[in-house]
Image: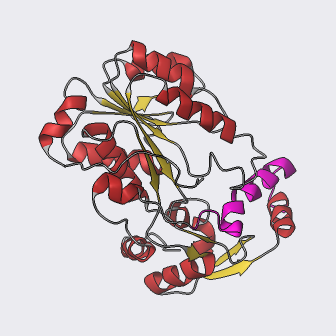
Amino acid sequence: MSEPLTTSEQPTTTGQSATTEQSATTEGPVLVTGATGKSGRRVVERLRARGLPVRAAARGGEHLFDWTDPATWDTALEGARAVYVVQLDGTRLVRPFVARAVRHGVRRIVLASGRGIDDPRYAKDSGGILEGIRDSEAAVRESGLEWTISRPGWFAQNFSEGFFADAVRAGELRLPAGEGAASFVDADDIAEVVAAALTEDGHAGQVYELSGPEALTLADAAATISAAAGREVRYVPVSFDAYVADLVRQGLPPADAQAFADVLEPLRKGTDAYVSDGVPRALGRPPRTFAEFAGSTAAAGGWHT
């Protein structure tokens, strides 16, 4: 998701010193929900690298946490003083979870949200996701806790461990994105922003829109990956209807195929192409480039077939 940069928060200056970390974390562990996901597992890695106690929670993680089973919420929250909330799309479970976090004495909360939730032009919402995300943001803002909201755009890692990974390994991206572009953000940058907001002072009340430093079309992305991986990866634009039909032929129900294709609308329309200032504001440095992401992924064998 993405949204126009309309927030009024002023830039903050933050540091990496151990003293700033003590205020939120020495009284208890940091709870990371969605700890096996793209951002969550990277947040866990960064917090543990700092020597901080972490409760890595997920349905299949170290600590059992299931959004659809509120019985798992209390054991996850017990004693925690900071929480990273990776919400379950299409639900309104964050509001009751935040209320329970307040009762448990949590002091600081970082919400994973997304660009575009306030922009009706951004994308179609046939899956009914946006209202739930808006309610989640409102719940966090109204909680009385020290809150920060992370609003990343399209993850660069969608090409290596997400939507497009199998197609990249096969050498051909067939997508209904036309010549649209996106400012793909590296999940490592997202995790560093979240880790800073969880452990350092100076981030309370901030909404960080996160993007990479430049917009790339899918043809640009494919060319960059090709150069890094040492083999050709082609982008082949297809029509929206043809793409939906392909998904249905692959066994996806028509409604799900339509919703999945709608997710790609920001790429097709270029509404995720603008560059945001969240990474520099939160970390005091520029975001990683897509070329840096592609190079490190290829070096780590991320696109071996």
Left-right relation of 218 to 127: left
Q: How many marks overall?
A: 0
User: In this orientation, does residue 65 appear?
Assistant: no
Left-right relation of 281 to 101: left
Considering only vertical position in the picture, is 70 above or below 173?
Answer: above
Considering only vertical position in the picture, is 152 above or below 229?
Answer: above
Residue 136 horizontal/vertical position (percent): 56, 32
In depth, the one of 87 and 110 nearer the eye is: 110
Q: Is the magenta stretch mostly helix, strand or loop?
A: helix
Residue at the far top: name it: 103
User: In this orientation, does residue 205 appear?
Assistant: yes
Residue at 55% in and 60% down: 154
Residue 80 horizontal/vertical position (percent): 32, 23
Residue at 63% in and 46% down: 118
| Quarter residue 277 falls in | bottom left
Residue 97 horizontal/vertical position (percent): 51, 22
Considering only vertical position in the picture, is 300 above or below 255?
Answer: below
